[in-house]
Amino acid sequence: MQPLPPQAVSPQPGKIIETGREQIHMLESGSAGGDPVVMLHGCGSIAEEVMMPFAGSGLHIIAPDRPGYGFSQALPAGERGPRGQSFWLERFFGALELDKVVLAAHSIGCAPALRLAVRRPDLLKGLFLISPCCRPVPFKPFIVLRSAVAPFVGPVIRQHVIARWSSYFLGRGLRASSYPNPVTAELLTLPAMHVVNAASIATMAEELWAFNGDMQPPESLPADLPVSVLFGREDRIIEPGWHLDWLHERHPALTVELLDGVGHMPHHVAPDLALTMLGDLVKKTPGELSGKVIPVLAPAETGEGGQPIIAVA
């Protein structure tokens, strides 16, 4: 039995960026003079998590808390799905005067990244999609999440059940997302109360409800935009084939790595491979990335399966 994440550890502080419409909290690492890499975390996560596997890489990494998560201000109603977040991302780039960005994203964070790539490919140098959730998905009940945003009982559940037991719910979500791999030690250091709280639960629900409608248009990605995809074959959060088929239809030359025995968190299970793929898009060689090399993956450990109550997606 793995330990639970700490309940009240302090979150990692960064910078607050003003776009003219909202405040965005971001973390930054590496040399500010290098080519920028912007990283988007998934559903129910924060910038701190998605940056962890790339610590010390030397790349210039910028990771915002997506709207409504961490310290970032939520978007207005009607703008909280992938489409609205793509405009939020464009404003973020503008505030930092970024262009020719390598945009990396995990899970549902890939959806606004793809929407931006279709609308403003001129802003991007490449896309790195980790366990991408991008194709409209069949209905799922999400009973706990729906209860948490239901009229009358929702605020009680969010504030007095889920938020009060944030360590338990974050730990359960991390185990479900990591399966069949164990939760890494660094993930267990995430600040539970900062990740799982009343505001983040509402944000999760709102972006999930908007997802299918915002990802319906069958637009193609620019053929000359490099796109790399990293997936675990044993992903229990989303079905790799379902989303890869959708991506192949929209881009003629994806670079895809499918890892045996790996679940929804391949960037944490195989960080050196993730770093190498990211470095290829930035046009650095693996030898320039702090001497890191692609690892040989050990056989996966079995873990807890089943449907998550809350998952880092």
Image (cartoon, grey):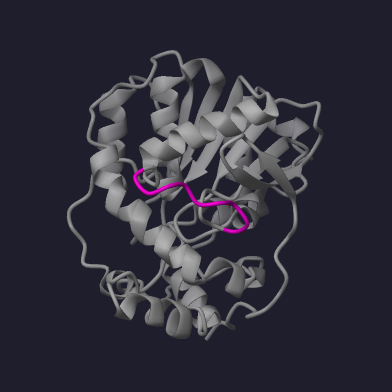
Q: Camera-side residue: 307 or 285?
A: 307
In this rendering, the answer to whether 28 lies above or below 34 is below
Q: Main secondary structure of the magenta part?
A: loop
Q: Is residue 255 visible?
A: no
Instruction: Look at 29% across and 42% down and name the residue there.
Output: 243
Quick one: quadrant of the C terminus? bottom left
Instruction: Look at 44% across and 56% down and name the residue there.
Output: 43
Q: Camera-side residue: 178 or 215?
A: 215
Instruction: Look at 47% across and 79% down and name the residue there.
Output: 159
**The magenta stretch spans residue 19:** no
Q: Is residue 136 visible?
A: yes
Q: Is residue 118 left or right of residue 62?
A: left
Instruction: Look at 45% across and 34% down and name the residue there.
Output: 86
x, y (%) of residue 203?
Answer: 43, 58
Q: Is residue 36 left or right of residue 108?
A: right
x, y (%) of residue 90?
Answer: 53, 29
In this rendering, the answer to whether 295 lies above or below 311 is above
Number of marks drawn: 0
Q: Is residue 127 left or right of residue 305?
A: right
x, y (%) of residue 150?
Answer: 28, 72
x, y (%) of residue 16?
Answer: 71, 46
Q: Camera-side residue: 126 or 73?
A: 73
**The magenta stretch spans residue 77:** yes
In this rendering, the answer to whether 80 lies above or below 119 is below
Range of magenta residues: 70-78
In this rendering, the answer to whether 42 lies above or below 190 is above
